[in-house]
Image (spheres, rainbow, N blue to C red):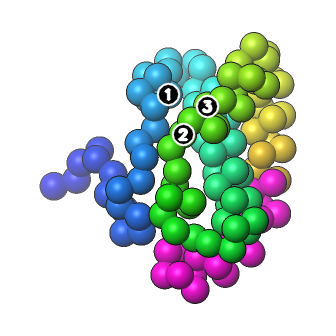
Amino acid sequence: MPTLERSFNVCPDRAAEPMWMQEIPLRQAYQRVLVQDIYRAQNLERIVETGSCDCEIRFPSWDAAEAVFRERHASDERWEMLQASDAYNRRTNAARLAAKAICEAAGNW
């Protein structure tokens, strides 16, 4: 029977999204997406910087991404957040191949 619970084959004990993100109203979902984009970019860049794909590096707590969101983007208009998401996605894409190679070697992709 399908459920909404997510389970992961890689790093199953990863930190859950903060509750406030899960409770964002649909009309403000772009805020949640931005924090997710920040998180993903930070994590892939950290993998490349450290050369490690340990679960704690690939899926750390959400604290750093939340801090960046609150410090740099929380008061932004919707269009500014969408632009920021695009920029973080470019950073993610720039790091993805190198991070993937490191993680595949560690069996964590």
Residue visible at 46% across and 22% down in the picture: 20
Circle 2 residue: 62
Residue sitting at the far bottom = 105
Q: Amino acid at mark 2?
A: Trp
Q: Is residue 4 left or right of residue 47?
A: left
Helix, strand or loop at label 3? It is: helix
Q: Residue at x 53, y 74 (%)?
A: 109
The residue shown at (52%, 50%) is 60
Q: Is residue 33 visible?
A: no
Percent x, y of residue 71 = 74, 23
Q: Nearer the viewer, residue 74 or 90?
A: 74
Task: Decide whether the magenta segment is chiefly helix, strand or loop.
Answer: helix
- Tags 3 and 2 in contact by the CB under 8 Å rule? yes
Q: Determine which of the numbered discs, if any, sits on residue 6 in the image.
A: none
Closer to us: mark 2 or mark 1? 2
The quarter of the picture where residue 73 lies is top right
The part of the image, by quadrant, that contains residue 10 is bottom left
From the viewer's side, name the closer residue of 80 and 59: 59
Residue labelled with disc 1: 21
Q: Residues within 10 Å of mark 1 (few under 14, many from 20)?
A: some
Query: Quick check: 94 above or below 100?
Result: above
Across and down, in percent, residue 94 comes to 82, 63
> Distance from label 2 to label 1 (Cα)?
11 Å
Helix, strand or loop status at disc 2: loop
The answer to whether the residue labelled 2 contacts the one labelled 1, judged by CB atoms less than 8 Å apart, is yes
Q: Are marks 1 and 3 in contact (CB under 8 Å)?
A: no
Looking at marks 1 and 3 on the same chain, the residue that comes earlier in the sequence is marked by 1
Q: Is residue 51 part of the magenta span, yes or no?
A: no
Q: Give the labeled residue for mark 3.
A: 66
Q: Is residue 57 above or below residue 61?
A: below
Left or right: 18 as drawn, with respect to 6: right
